Image: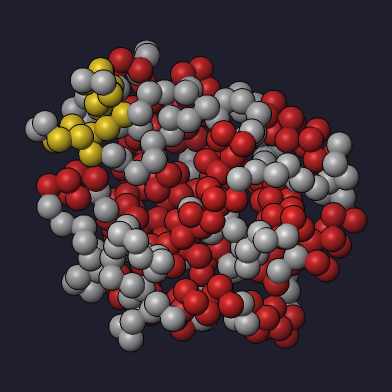
């Protein structure tokens, strides 16, 4: 990353991007005073304070875990917790700590009951949040690490996609005991380390080669009797190509989390698309300037935290966010 781009983000972008650029891209160990100064500035954010206004006294945000009520402008609990984490806050911040503590008591899975919820496996949402917060020692996190590894094993061991899913009506349905990694399972592995041994890393590398050869895949569902359940963002998009507006939000998801897994290095089939991103950045003085539709980033920010700036009403805020995310991915790529 060019020094001038580092200075550009640190000097001009919002406090979260400035702080995370130093800590995560430059790998700088901040002293307590500088860190607290950044946290104080982050806590002045209007958007952050709006999110905090949705927190109940027990620490739960809103009324639901995963999906906000129809026509509600209040995010679900999951999105609020992830947003606080993406803003760079940690467990020293009491509202974040409370939001995780409340997920350890009965009733944490608000709205998520019934057969469809059980099949969907809402516990992986909780595990993904705890993993990102650095809370790796809970038994339920380890259980979902095992499930995440199994999802990649399904891909690694299949000769073709027909061994994982088959046509059902006008869609595809998973075969019994077969499924794909999804966004939550990616997060669980991306932010944990106990699973990282030679055997598992080699298995993931094999699965990533299969994914590269197969993508894009048809939308695929879990079949429960005659009901189809959407399994939380399967890895089915056209991520085996250069970034473009049609896949941009999910491209950033996939490449950042995969880079955290160590699956975007020079030996990865996806690596040429990292090089293409870098060529684009070099052609624009290190900046990501393409005007992508902000709706995807805004609507999904409650699930992803990709939009760290207050809003994108001005071009420069979009540039700060996407430039930071592009260089963060690069900093995570293992050479």
Q: Position of residue 107 (x, y in %)?
A: 19, 70
Q: Residue at x 57, y 55 (%)?
A: 306
**Lateral position of residue 290 relative to residue 209, left or right:** right
In the foreground, 229 or 10 = 229
Q: Position of residue 262 (x, y in %)?
A: 58, 40
Whether residue 130 is visible, yes or no, is no
Q: Residue at x 33, y 35 (%)?
A: 150
Whether residue 67 is visible, yes or no, is yes
In the foreground, 16 or 140 = 16
Location of residue 126 (image quadrant) = bottom left
Q: Position of residue 159 (x, y in %)?
A: 37, 13
In the foreground, 142 or 34 = 34
Location of residue 105 (image quadrant) = bottom left
Q: Quadrant of the C terminus?
A: top right
**Lateral position of residue 332 relative to residue 95, left or right:** right
**Lateral position of residue 171 relative to residue 313, left or right:** left
**Lateral position of residue 269 relative to residue 27, left or right:** left
Colour scheme shown: secondary structure
């Amino acid at each position: 990353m060019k020094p001038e781009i580092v200075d550009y983000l640190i000097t001009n972008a919002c406090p979260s991007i400035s702080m995370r650029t130093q800590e995560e891209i430059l790998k700088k160990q901040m002293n307590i005073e500088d860190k607290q100064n950044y946290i104080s500035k982050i806590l002045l954010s209007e958007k952050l304070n709006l999110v905090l206004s949705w927190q109940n006294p027990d620490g739960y945000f809103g009324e639901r875990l995963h999906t906000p009520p129809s026509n509600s402008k209040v995010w679900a609990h999951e999105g609020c917790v992830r947003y606080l984490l993406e803003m760079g806050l940690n467990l020293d911040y009491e509202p974040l700590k409370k939001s995780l503590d409340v997920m350890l008591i009965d009733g944490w899975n608000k709205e998520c009951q019934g057969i469809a919820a059980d099949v969907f496996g809402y516990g992986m949402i909780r595990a993904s949040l705890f993993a990102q917060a650095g809370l790796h020692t809970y038994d339920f996190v380890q259980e979902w690490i095992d499930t995440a590894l199994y999802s990649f094993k399904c891909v690694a061991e299949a000769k073709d996609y027909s061994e994982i899913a088959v046509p059902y009506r006008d869609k595809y349905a998973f075969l019994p005991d077969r499924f794909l990694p999804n966004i939550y399972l990616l997060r669980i592995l991306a932010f944990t380390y106990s699973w990282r041994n030679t055997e598992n890393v080699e298995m993931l590398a094999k699965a990533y080669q299969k994914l590269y050869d197969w993508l894009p895949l048809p939308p695929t569902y879990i079949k429960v009797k005659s009901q189809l359940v959407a399994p939380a963002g399967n890895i089915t998009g056209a991520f085996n190509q250069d970034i473009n507006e049609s896949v941009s939000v999910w491209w950033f998801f996939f490449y950042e989390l995969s880079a955290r897994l160590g699956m975007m290095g020079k030996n990865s089939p996806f690596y040429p698309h990292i090089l293409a991103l870098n060529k684009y950045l070099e052609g624009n003085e290190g900046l990501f300037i393409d005007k992508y539709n902000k709706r995807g980033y805004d609507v999904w920010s409650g699930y992803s935290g990709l939009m760290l700036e207050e809003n994108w009403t001005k071009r420069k805020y979009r540039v700060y966010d996407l430039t930071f995310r592009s260089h963060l991915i690069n900093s995570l790529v293992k050479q």
